Image (cartoon, rainbow, N blue to C red):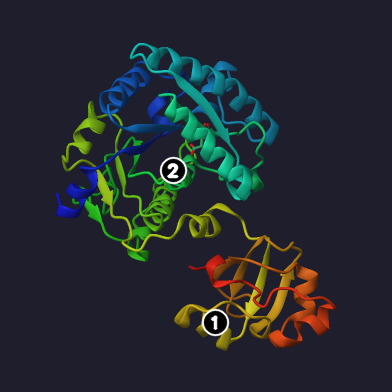
């Protein structure tokens, strides 16, 4: 084990564990009580002196079994109905399994909007903190029953990274059916090797994620690597490990070289910037000129109206927008705007001292203040 990994894992106080559908359900049968009990025992064994949050998938698969559906429903309302049924069955199993260890559980269902809206985000954070203060194990899932596809986080790998960031967790563990990230598919390539540590999720690493989506699970390696990027930016180390290995949590917290370890970034983004970068879907797009781009990326400046070339979308002031280098170009930054879209259309390209004349009132000097701007 690399020294940084040992150092990080020696001090885990807040731990987020995510379990995949394949782990807590059996195809066609729904919730798998034996594996849920093993998971509860594994979590109970590492909870002493730690705050633990569980993120669970499996609601839809469990609901499908309970409703006797052989195939994953295609229609959104049908999927939502399956989630509604499955979520309560799943929680029933968790309640029974954790009760045996004297642990009370609390169900927390989040939507992308709960995370994307700053006030709701802070509210969710306070609720989780209160549950942890009561000694409760929060069990989180996406609120599939009300969230439609377009506005969903969509998979619990990314959701768990957002939760880990929200809680400033010390470690995120994704428990799944495989014991880590491999250089190739071990089922077809005998020389495939498991990576012990990933220092950075580069494009080469992303290419290793060949998705083999099956009927029940949403994510695969691709969403796990997206989660790793979010966690790294938040300064949270992440481990992908096999949830089928008994005592896996205890072993990895004791420093055993279990799974694949994803190192966090040394220069973690501040909490508010993490929210800007990852939690919200941008409500509009600003194209800026080359000078503004350099000012933002190289000199840490704020975005001024003079650098704005084009304004797309219909957003209010205080919302998050994407910043592009040229129309249709790559998004290189994201930030909270001080003006709404209509105001910005009036002042784009204008010198700061002329803002008042254009708008007819005094307002901000910056379009996006650098404290509210994240370079991606
Ligand atoms: N929220 C979904 C469920 O509970 C699972 C999403 C995922 O597998 O990532 O069924």
Disc 2: CA contacts within 10 A as few (<14), some (14-19) or many (>=20): many
In the image, residue 246 lies at what x, y percent?
Answer: 23, 26
Q: In the displayed structure, would residue 313 be above or below residue 20?
A: below
In the rendered structure, the answer to whether residue 165 lies left or right of residue 110 reads: left
Q: Residue at x 27, y 28 (%)?
A: 46
Q: Residue at x 49, y 31 (%)?
A: 130
* Mark carried by residue 167: 2
How far, Cα to Cα, is label 1 from label 2? Answer: 32 Å
In the image, residue 351 lies at what x, y percent?
Answer: 70, 88
Q: Is residue 350 visible?
A: no
In the rendered structure, the answer to whether residue 222 lies left or right of residue 63 reads: left
Q: Is residue 364 visible?
A: yes
Depth check: give the residue in front, 150 or 352: 352
Depth check: give the residue in front, 157 or 25: 157
Badge 1 element: helix
Disc 1: CA contacts within 10 A as few (<14), some (14-19) or many (>=20): many
Q: Residue at x 30, y 38 (%)?
A: 13
In the rendered structure, the answer to whether residue 320 lies left or right of residue 103 reads: right
In the image, residue 225 lies at what x, y percent?
Answer: 39, 52
Q: Quadrant of residue 334?
A: bottom right
């Amino acid at each position: 084990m690399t020294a940084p990994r040992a150092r990080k894992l020696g001090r885990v106080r807040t731990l987020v564990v995510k379990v995949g559908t394949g782990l807590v359900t059996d195809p066609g049968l729904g919730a798998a009580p034996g594996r849920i009990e093993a998971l509860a025992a594994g979590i109970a064994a590492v909870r002493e002196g730690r705050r633990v949050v569980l993120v669970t998938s499996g609601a839809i698969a469990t609901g499908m079994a309970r409703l006797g559906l052989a195939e994953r429903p295609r229609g959104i309302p049908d999927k939502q109905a399956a989630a509604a049924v499955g979520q309560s069955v799943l929680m029933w199993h968790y309640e029974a399994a954790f009760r045996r260890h004297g642990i009370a559980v609390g169900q927390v269902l989040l939507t992308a909007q709960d995370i994307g809206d700053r006030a709701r985000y802070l509210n969710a954070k306070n609720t989780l903190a209160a549950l942890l203060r009561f000694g409760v194990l929060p069990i989180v899932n996406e609120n599939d029953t009300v969230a439609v596809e377009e506005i969903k986080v969509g998979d619990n790998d990314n959701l768990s990274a957002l939760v880990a960031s929200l809680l400033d967790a010390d470690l995120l563990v994704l428990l799944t059916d495989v014991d880590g990230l491999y250089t190739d598919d071990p089922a077809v390539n005998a020389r495939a090797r498991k990576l012990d540590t990933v220092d950075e999720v580069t494009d080469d690493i992303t290419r290793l994620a060949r998705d083999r989506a099956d009927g029940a699970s949403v994510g695969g390696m691709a969403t796990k690597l997206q989660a790793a990027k979010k966690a790294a930016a938040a300064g949270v180390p992440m481990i992908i490990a096999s949830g089928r290995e008994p005592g896996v949590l205890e072993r990895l917290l004791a420093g055993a070289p279990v799974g694949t370890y994803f190192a966090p970034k040394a220069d973690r983004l501040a909490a508010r910037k993490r929210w800007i970068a990852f939690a919200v879907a941008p409500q509009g797009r600003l194209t800026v000129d080359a000078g503004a781009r350099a000012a933002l990326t190289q000199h840490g400046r704020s975005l001024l109206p003079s650098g704005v070339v084009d304004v797309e979308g219909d957003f209010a002031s205080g919302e998050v927008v994407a910043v592009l280098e040229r129309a249709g170009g790559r998004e290189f930054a994201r930030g909270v705007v001080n003006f709404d879209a209509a105001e910005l259309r009036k002042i784009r390209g204008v010198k700061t001292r002329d803002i008042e004349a254009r708008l007819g009132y005094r307002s901000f000097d910056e379009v996006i203040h650098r404290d509210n701007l994240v370079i991606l």
